[in-house]
Image: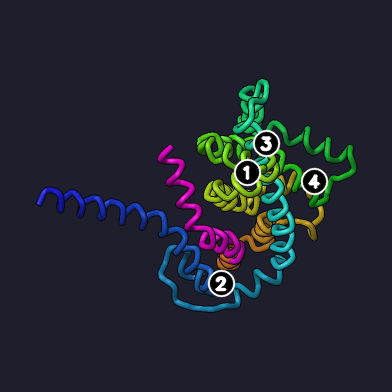
Amino acid sequence: MTNRFKTGGYHLAMGLVSLLWVAPILWVIVISFRSFDDVAANGLGSLPHSFTFSTYVQAWQDADEFRALVNSLLVTIPAVLLSLGLASIAAYGLARYNIPFRRTVLLLMLMGNLLPPQILLIPISRFVELIGYYDTLIALIAVHVGFGLGFYTFVLHGFMRDLPKEIQEAATIDGAGPGRIFSSVILPLTRPALAALGALSFTWIFNDLLWSITVIRSGDKMPVTPALLGLQGLFVSSWNVIAAGTVIAAVPTVAVFLRFQKHFVGGLAIGAVK
Protein backbone atom coordinates (compact mmCIF):
# COMPACT_ATOMS: atom_id res chain seq x y z
CA MET A 1 0.00 0.00 0.00
CA THR A 2 2.84 2.38 0.85
CA ASN A 3 4.59 1.66 -2.42
CA ARG A 4 1.39 2.27 -4.38
CA PHE A 5 0.87 5.55 -2.57
CA LYS A 6 4.43 6.64 -3.36
CA THR A 7 4.07 5.59 -7.00
CA GLY A 8 0.76 7.41 -7.36
CA GLY A 9 2.18 10.54 -5.75
CA TYR A 10 5.21 10.42 -8.02
CA HIS A 11 3.08 10.08 -11.17
CA LEU A 12 0.79 12.88 -9.99
CA ALA A 13 3.75 15.20 -9.34
CA MET A 14 5.36 14.38 -12.68
CA GLY A 15 2.04 14.89 -14.43
CA LEU A 16 1.71 18.37 -12.92
CA VAL A 17 5.28 19.22 -13.88
CA SER A 18 4.64 18.00 -17.43
CA LEU A 19 1.47 20.08 -17.59
CA LEU A 20 3.38 23.18 -16.50
CA TRP A 21 5.92 22.52 -19.27
CA VAL A 22 3.32 21.83 -21.98
CA ALA A 23 0.89 24.60 -21.03
CA PRO A 24 2.83 27.53 -22.62
CA ILE A 25 3.27 25.55 -25.84
CA LEU A 26 -0.43 24.75 -26.04
CA TRP A 27 -1.21 28.39 -25.22
CA VAL A 28 0.89 29.60 -28.17
CA ILE A 29 -0.75 27.07 -30.51
CA VAL A 30 -4.23 28.14 -29.44
CA ILE A 31 -3.38 31.84 -29.94
CA SER A 32 -2.03 31.09 -33.42
CA PHE A 33 -5.49 29.92 -34.55
CA ARG A 34 -7.37 32.91 -33.12
CA SER A 35 -8.36 35.93 -35.17
CA PHE A 36 -7.05 39.41 -34.48
CA ASP A 37 -10.51 40.67 -33.47
CA ASP A 38 -10.89 37.82 -31.00
CA VAL A 39 -7.52 38.52 -29.35
CA ALA A 40 -8.11 42.28 -29.31
CA ALA A 41 -11.59 41.99 -27.81
CA ASN A 42 -11.05 39.21 -25.27
CA GLY A 43 -7.31 39.26 -24.53
CA LEU A 44 -4.57 36.67 -24.92
CA GLY A 45 -5.52 34.75 -21.77
CA SER A 46 -9.16 34.21 -22.63
CA LEU A 47 -10.75 31.13 -24.15
CA PRO A 48 -10.78 31.18 -27.97
CA HIS A 49 -13.90 32.52 -29.67
CA SER A 50 -12.66 32.02 -33.22
CA PHE A 51 -10.67 29.62 -35.37
CA THR A 52 -8.73 30.60 -38.51
CA PHE A 53 -5.77 29.52 -40.63
CA SER A 54 -5.27 33.01 -42.05
CA THR A 55 -2.69 33.81 -39.36
CA TYR A 56 -0.38 31.12 -40.75
CA VAL A 57 -0.81 32.45 -44.30
CA GLN A 58 -0.08 35.96 -43.10
CA ALA A 59 2.99 34.91 -41.12
CA TRP A 60 4.28 32.81 -44.04
CA GLN A 61 3.92 35.64 -46.55
CA ASP A 62 4.76 38.78 -44.58
CA ALA A 63 7.79 37.34 -42.81
CA ASP A 64 8.96 35.50 -45.95
CA GLU A 65 9.27 32.50 -43.67
CA PHE A 66 9.97 30.03 -46.44
CA ARG A 67 13.15 31.88 -47.39
CA ALA A 68 14.07 32.22 -43.71
CA LEU A 69 13.59 28.48 -43.12
CA VAL A 70 15.75 27.68 -46.14
CA ASN A 71 18.47 30.01 -44.84
CA SER A 72 18.31 28.36 -41.43
CA LEU A 73 18.67 24.90 -42.95
CA LEU A 74 21.53 26.08 -45.20
CA VAL A 75 23.34 27.17 -42.04
CA THR A 76 22.26 24.46 -39.61
CA ILE A 77 22.87 21.30 -41.65
CA PRO A 78 26.45 22.13 -42.76
CA ALA A 79 27.30 23.49 -39.31
CA VAL A 80 26.08 20.33 -37.56
CA LEU A 81 27.84 17.99 -40.01
CA LEU A 82 31.12 19.92 -39.89
CA SER A 83 31.04 20.29 -36.12
CA LEU A 84 30.34 16.63 -35.41
CA GLY A 85 32.75 15.45 -38.13
CA LEU A 86 35.67 17.52 -36.87
CA ALA A 87 34.80 16.81 -33.24
CA SER A 88 34.72 13.06 -33.94
CA ILE A 89 38.17 13.14 -35.51
CA ALA A 90 39.60 15.26 -32.69
CA ALA A 91 37.98 13.12 -29.99
CA TYR A 92 39.23 9.92 -31.65
CA GLY A 93 42.83 11.13 -31.63
CA LEU A 94 42.66 12.47 -28.08
CA ALA A 95 40.87 9.43 -26.64
CA ARG A 96 42.56 6.50 -28.39
CA TYR A 97 46.18 7.63 -28.86
CA ASN A 98 48.88 8.92 -26.53
CA ILE A 99 49.12 12.45 -27.88
CA PRO A 100 51.41 14.77 -25.86
CA PHE A 101 49.49 17.27 -23.71
CA ARG A 102 46.20 15.81 -24.87
CA ARG A 103 44.45 16.75 -21.61
CA THR A 104 45.70 20.32 -21.96
CA VAL A 105 44.49 20.45 -25.55
CA LEU A 106 41.08 19.16 -24.50
CA LEU A 107 40.79 21.71 -21.69
CA LEU A 108 41.81 24.55 -23.99
CA MET A 109 39.13 23.52 -26.48
CA LEU A 110 36.55 23.40 -23.72
CA MET A 111 37.59 26.73 -22.22
CA GLY A 112 36.40 28.52 -25.33
CA ASN A 113 32.84 27.58 -24.42
CA LEU A 114 33.18 29.18 -21.00
CA LEU A 115 33.58 32.67 -22.46
CA PRO A 116 30.36 34.71 -22.55
CA PRO A 117 29.48 35.14 -26.24
CA GLN A 118 28.50 38.78 -25.65
CA ILE A 119 32.12 39.85 -25.13
CA LEU A 120 33.07 38.30 -28.48
CA LEU A 121 30.40 39.98 -30.60
CA ILE A 122 32.46 43.00 -31.67
CA PRO A 123 35.77 41.12 -32.24
CA ILE A 124 34.11 38.43 -34.35
CA SER A 125 32.03 40.95 -36.28
CA ARG A 126 35.14 43.01 -37.09
CA PHE A 127 37.18 39.94 -37.97
CA VAL A 128 34.52 38.59 -40.33
CA GLU A 129 34.28 42.02 -41.95
CA LEU A 130 38.08 42.26 -42.39
CA ILE A 131 38.34 38.90 -44.16
CA GLY A 132 35.48 39.80 -46.49
CA TYR A 133 32.84 37.32 -45.32
CA TYR A 134 30.53 39.66 -43.45
CA ASP A 135 26.85 39.26 -44.32
CA THR A 136 27.33 35.71 -45.66
CA LEU A 137 25.95 32.38 -44.53
CA ILE A 138 29.49 30.96 -44.65
CA ALA A 139 30.52 33.29 -41.82
CA LEU A 140 27.55 32.17 -39.71
CA ILE A 141 28.40 28.51 -40.33
CA ALA A 142 32.02 29.10 -39.33
CA VAL A 143 30.99 30.84 -36.10
CA HIS A 144 28.73 27.97 -35.06
CA VAL A 145 31.38 25.37 -35.91
CA GLY A 146 34.03 27.26 -33.96
CA PHE A 147 31.93 27.68 -30.85
CA GLY A 148 30.52 24.16 -30.80
CA LEU A 149 33.66 22.21 -31.64
CA GLY A 150 35.17 22.26 -28.15
CA PHE A 151 32.03 21.05 -26.40
CA TYR A 152 31.29 18.33 -28.94
CA THR A 153 34.90 17.10 -28.75
CA PHE A 154 34.72 16.97 -24.95
CA VAL A 155 31.52 14.90 -24.97
CA LEU A 156 32.65 12.50 -27.71
CA HIS A 157 36.02 12.10 -26.02
CA GLY A 158 34.27 10.71 -22.95
CA PHE A 159 32.35 8.16 -25.02
CA MET A 160 35.31 7.06 -27.11
CA ARG A 161 37.67 6.83 -24.16
CA ASP A 162 35.45 4.27 -22.42
CA LEU A 163 35.14 1.98 -25.43
CA PRO A 164 37.01 -1.30 -24.85
CA LYS A 165 40.56 -1.14 -26.17
CA GLU A 166 40.33 -4.80 -27.15
CA ILE A 167 38.04 -3.86 -30.05
CA GLN A 168 40.64 -1.53 -31.50
CA GLU A 169 43.42 -4.06 -30.90
CA ALA A 170 41.45 -6.77 -32.68
CA ALA A 171 40.88 -4.50 -35.66
CA THR A 172 44.58 -3.66 -35.75
CA ILE A 173 45.48 -7.37 -35.77
CA ASP A 174 43.10 -7.82 -38.71
CA GLY A 175 45.10 -5.23 -40.62
CA ALA A 176 42.88 -2.17 -40.21
CA GLY A 177 44.62 1.20 -40.09
CA PRO A 178 43.64 4.20 -37.96
CA GLY A 179 41.25 5.54 -40.60
CA ARG A 180 39.54 2.19 -41.06
CA ILE A 181 39.23 1.69 -37.30
CA PHE A 182 37.74 5.15 -36.94
CA SER A 183 35.15 4.78 -39.71
CA SER A 184 34.22 1.10 -39.26
CA VAL A 185 34.64 0.53 -35.52
CA ILE A 186 34.63 3.71 -33.47
CA LEU A 187 31.96 5.73 -35.29
CA PRO A 188 29.29 2.98 -35.28
CA LEU A 189 29.82 2.47 -31.55
CA THR A 190 29.55 6.23 -30.97
CA ARG A 191 26.32 6.59 -32.94
CA PRO A 192 24.07 7.20 -29.88
CA ALA A 193 26.32 10.04 -28.73
CA LEU A 194 26.48 11.50 -32.24
CA ALA A 195 22.70 11.34 -32.57
CA ALA A 196 22.18 13.02 -29.20
CA LEU A 197 24.67 15.77 -30.01
CA GLY A 198 23.23 16.13 -33.50
CA ALA A 199 19.72 16.72 -32.16
CA LEU A 200 20.96 19.20 -29.57
CA SER A 201 23.23 21.09 -31.95
CA PHE A 202 20.51 21.26 -34.60
CA THR A 203 18.19 22.87 -32.07
CA TRP A 204 20.82 25.31 -30.80
CA ILE A 205 21.96 26.45 -34.22
CA PHE A 206 18.51 26.55 -35.83
CA ASN A 207 17.12 28.71 -33.01
CA ASP A 208 20.14 31.02 -32.80
CA LEU A 209 19.47 34.73 -32.77
CA LEU A 210 22.59 36.35 -31.34
CA TRP A 211 25.14 35.32 -33.98
CA SER A 212 22.63 35.67 -36.81
CA ILE A 213 22.10 39.37 -36.19
CA THR A 214 25.85 39.81 -35.54
CA VAL A 215 27.25 38.58 -38.86
CA ILE A 216 24.18 38.85 -41.13
CA ARG A 217 22.74 42.18 -42.26
CA SER A 218 20.66 41.54 -45.38
CA GLY A 219 17.03 40.61 -44.84
CA ASP A 220 17.04 37.98 -47.60
CA LYS A 221 19.86 36.11 -45.81
CA MET A 222 18.35 36.14 -42.33
CA PRO A 223 17.55 32.78 -40.68
CA VAL A 224 14.14 32.12 -39.24
CA THR A 225 14.66 33.46 -35.71
CA PRO A 226 15.68 36.98 -36.81
CA ALA A 227 12.83 36.84 -39.31
CA LEU A 228 10.41 36.24 -36.42
CA LEU A 229 11.98 39.19 -34.64
CA GLY A 230 11.22 41.33 -37.68
CA LEU A 231 7.68 39.98 -37.72
CA GLN A 232 7.22 41.12 -34.15
CA GLY A 233 8.38 44.59 -35.10
CA LEU A 234 5.99 44.67 -38.05
CA PHE A 235 2.93 43.40 -36.17
CA VAL A 236 3.27 44.93 -32.74
CA SER A 237 -0.22 43.95 -31.60
CA SER A 238 -0.89 40.93 -33.84
CA TRP A 239 0.25 38.30 -31.38
CA ASN A 240 -1.76 35.64 -33.18
CA VAL A 241 0.39 36.14 -36.31
CA ILE A 242 3.57 36.07 -34.23
CA ALA A 243 2.40 32.86 -32.55
CA ALA A 244 1.67 31.31 -35.95
CA GLY A 245 5.17 32.19 -37.17
CA THR A 246 6.64 30.68 -34.03
CA VAL A 247 4.76 27.41 -34.55
CA ILE A 248 5.98 27.20 -38.15
CA ALA A 249 9.57 27.84 -37.07
CA ALA A 250 9.36 25.08 -34.45
CA VAL A 251 8.36 22.35 -36.92
CA PRO A 252 11.90 21.45 -38.16
CA THR A 253 13.38 21.10 -34.68
CA VAL A 254 10.45 19.00 -33.48
CA ALA A 255 10.78 16.77 -36.54
CA VAL A 256 14.51 16.26 -35.93
CA PHE A 257 13.94 15.39 -32.28
CA LEU A 258 11.19 12.88 -33.09
CA ARG A 259 13.35 11.30 -35.79
CA PHE A 260 16.34 10.83 -33.47
CA GLN A 261 14.42 10.37 -30.23
CA LYS A 262 15.48 6.74 -29.79
CA HIS A 263 19.15 7.51 -30.32
CA PHE A 264 18.87 10.63 -28.17
CA VAL A 265 17.49 8.68 -25.20
CA GLY A 266 20.09 5.97 -25.80
CA GLY A 267 22.89 8.53 -25.70
CA LEU A 268 21.60 9.95 -22.43
CA ALA A 269 21.36 6.44 -20.95
CA ILE A 270 24.96 5.66 -21.87
CA GLY A 271 26.09 8.91 -20.33
CA ALA A 272 24.16 8.12 -17.15
CA VAL A 273 25.78 4.69 -16.84
CA LYS A 274 29.23 6.20 -17.22
What's the CA distance linking mark 4 and mark 3? 22 Å
Distance from disc 2 to disc 1, alpha carbons, whole Å, reads 69 Å
Residue type, label 1 = Asp
Mark 3 or 1: the one toward you? 1
Real-space Cα distance between discs 2 and 4? 39 Å
Q: Which mark is residue 139?
A: 4
Q: Is 45 placed above or below 140 here?
A: below
N-terminal-most mark, 4 or 3: 3
> Which label's residue is closer to the chain start, 2 or 1?
2
For discs 2 and 1, the disc positioned in front in the rendered view: 1
Q: Residue at x 46, y 41 (%)?
A: 271
Q: Residues within 10 Å of mark 2 (few under 14, many from 20)?
A: some
- Residue indicated by mark 1: 174
Q: Is residue 29 left or right of residue 75?
A: left
Nearer-N-terminus badge (3/2): 2
Any mark on residue 187, and which? none
Question: Which residue is the site of mark 2?
Answer: 36
Q: Earlier in the sequence, mark 4 or mark 1?
A: 4
Give the percent coordinates (x, y) of residue 241.
Answer: 60, 67
Residue at the limit of the structure toward the front, as seen here: 174
The x, y position of residue 140, in whole percent, is: 76, 47
Mark 3, other Cα within 10 Å: few <14 / some 14–19 / many ≥20: some
Residue 105 in sight from this viewpoint:
yes
Question: From which residue to which does the magenta span run?
Answer: 248-274
Secondary structure type for disc 2? helix
- Name the amino acid, label 2: Phe
Foreground pick, 200 / 222: 200
Q: Residue at x 60, y 42 (%)?
A: 171
Q: Are marks 4 and 1 in contact (CB under 8 Å)?
A: no
Rounded to the nearest angstrom, the CA distance separating label 3 from label 1 is 24 Å
Say which residue label 3 marks.
90
Secondary-structure class at tag 3: helix
